Amino acid sequence: NKVTVNAGGYMQIGNSTLTVNGNIVNNGTILAASGSPSAAINFAGTAQQTVSGSGTWEIPGSGPNRFPIFTINNTSGSTPAVVLNHSLALRNGLSLLTGTLGSGNSSTLTIGTGEPQTINIYVGNGATPGGSIHSTLNVSHNLGLTTFNAYYQNLVPSAPYTTGKELPGLAATLPAAGTITINNTHASGVTMGDDISTFGFTITNPATLVMNGKTLRIA
């Protein structure tokens, strides 16, 4: 299914998940009803999906070009699988389950909105191969007042994972609270692909973190 919001039009998503199998063209406004922190869009296509348009994404009371949660679960095998051609911020969550999230026009995804909210990042969910953020998408982090959690789950089929742009680097402001949790028990573990800043860090036995010569900054 394709979602098109025409100029002057509105689409509201409440305490629910909208699953989209096609493209999203937003020339109007897509908003989280009543500022719901659980409003989510699940990108679940079997072909490459694109997010485009000249409209805005909005969380009432928070600001424009913001939305609570995206889930990337695209099985197309395209690179990237989901193409974000509109810069926006995610306030409450990003799940990288299957496929890559990238951009065709150097858009920026901001993780966090700098508010006293909680944002949860999931890589895998115990039933998927895990997704990632492609190099074509610019990523920034705005976590100064935010509780930031990231969970690296077991992947199916079983596989190691290398962290990427989903985590804040050394230049980022440390989050106010939260924990990065390594639950992936593959023998090769989770490898740091870059330097990381975090408030807290947990490795559950027998999971492994391979630092790979990178720096882990813990508040």
Image: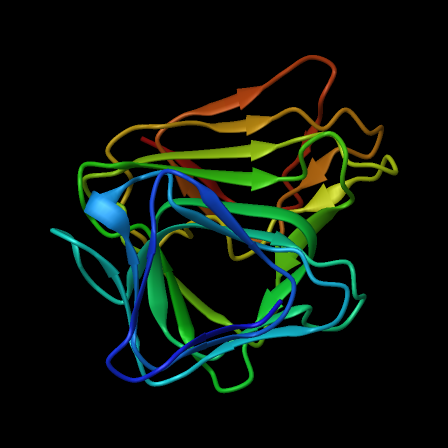
- Which of 160/2 is in front? 2
Residue 188 sits in quarter: top right
Q: How is the image coloured?
A: rainbow
Residue 214 appearing in the image: no
Q: Position of residue 109 (x, y in %)?
A: 41, 65
Residue found at the far right of this picture: 157
Residue found at the far top of this picture: 205
Residue 49 appearing in the image: yes
State the residue at coordinates (50%, 44%): 215
State the residue at coordinates (56%, 38%): 122
Number of labelled discs? 0
Q: Position of residue 119 (x, y in %)?
A: 37, 39
Q: Position of residue 6 (x, y in %)?
A: 35, 82
Residue found at the far left of this picture: 61
- Which of 118/55 is in front? 55
Q: Position of residue 79 (x, y in %)?
A: 73, 73
In the image, 125: left or right of 111? right
State the residue at coordinates (67%, 39%): 124
- Which of 7/37 is in front? 7
Whether residue 5 is situated above or below residue 119 in the rendered picture: below
Residue 2 sits in quarter: bottom right
Whether residue 27 is situated above or below residue 157 in the rendered picture: below
- Which of 39/104 is in front? 39
Report the quarter where the C terminus lies: top left
Report the quarter where the N terminus lies: bottom right
In the image, 121: left or right of 219? right
